[in-house]
Amino acid sequence: IFGVSPPLEVAASLKARVLRPARQLCAAGYCLYGAHTALVVAVGGGRPRVFTLCPKTRRFLSVAGEAGELCCPAAGPTYSCNEAQAHEWDGKVREFIDQRKIAGGRLRYVGSMVADVHRTLLQGGVFLYPHTPTRPHGKLRLLYECGPLAYVATSAGGKAIVVDSGEEVLDAVPTGLHARCPVLMGGSSDVEHFLSILEKSLPP
């Protein structure tokens, strides 16, 4: 996973130059290893492009046609999360997953954020890693995991939010290099479904 930020003035502090919200990225992407090696890159808010590694030339080649451009469906049949931790989730997360199950949703969870998010961007649905009592701020890091992937997801037409507040991940400011973030991202309609549940749980 990587993100690229435009430079700030040299006079800016190191903290100001590094701890910036993902909204300020000018590019982001990730590599995915499996049956083939894929590189996904989003630049300037345009649709993410997909490249595949040619084993003969050892160069990444642009994938032709619709398959070469990520466009996340607004809704999808799957949800991706570590359901073994469901007993530790708070009520709004459990309600959301229960409603997806009732609607026929299917669990698809590899345990690799990049693989799970990539599938979600292709097929729709949601990826989530909420907080638990043992991980009160979630597990995934905001600066170099959630932020760059949120940039890719939103560039693909999806949404990415902080589970506890509903704030867009792109606007969340890292408080440290390894600051964590409880995250939910995926198809825009599926994320809006969670936001409707979250809204009921927030104080007036």
Image (cartoon, grey):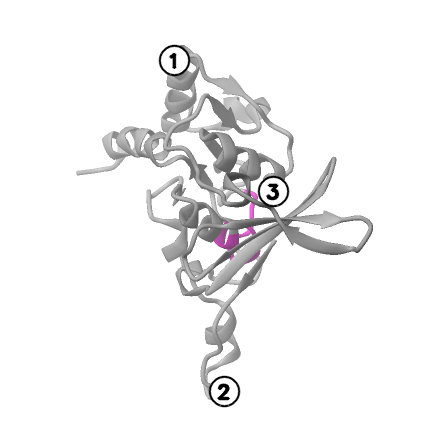
Residue 12 position by quadrant: bottom left
- Mark closest to the chain's N terminus, 3 or 2: 2
Q: Is residue 167 left or right of residue 22?
A: left
Residue 173: x and y, percent? 41, 60
Screen quadrant of the C terminus: top left
First to last magenta residue range: 139-148
* Residue type marked 3: Val
Crowding at dot 1, Cα within 10 Å, few <14 / some 14-19 / many 20+, comes out as few
Disc 1: which residue: 103
Q: Is residue 132 above or below residue 154?
A: above
Work out whether residue 128 can be spotted: no
Work out whether residue 27 can be spotted: yes
Q: Is residue 34 left or right of residue 81?
A: right
- Mark closest to the chain's N terminus, 3 or 1: 1
Q: Is residue 117 left or right of residue 167?
A: right
Disc 2: which residue: 10
Q: How many marks?
A: 3
Q: Distance from label 3 to label 2 (Cα)?
A: 33 Å
Question: For residue 95: magenta?
Answer: no
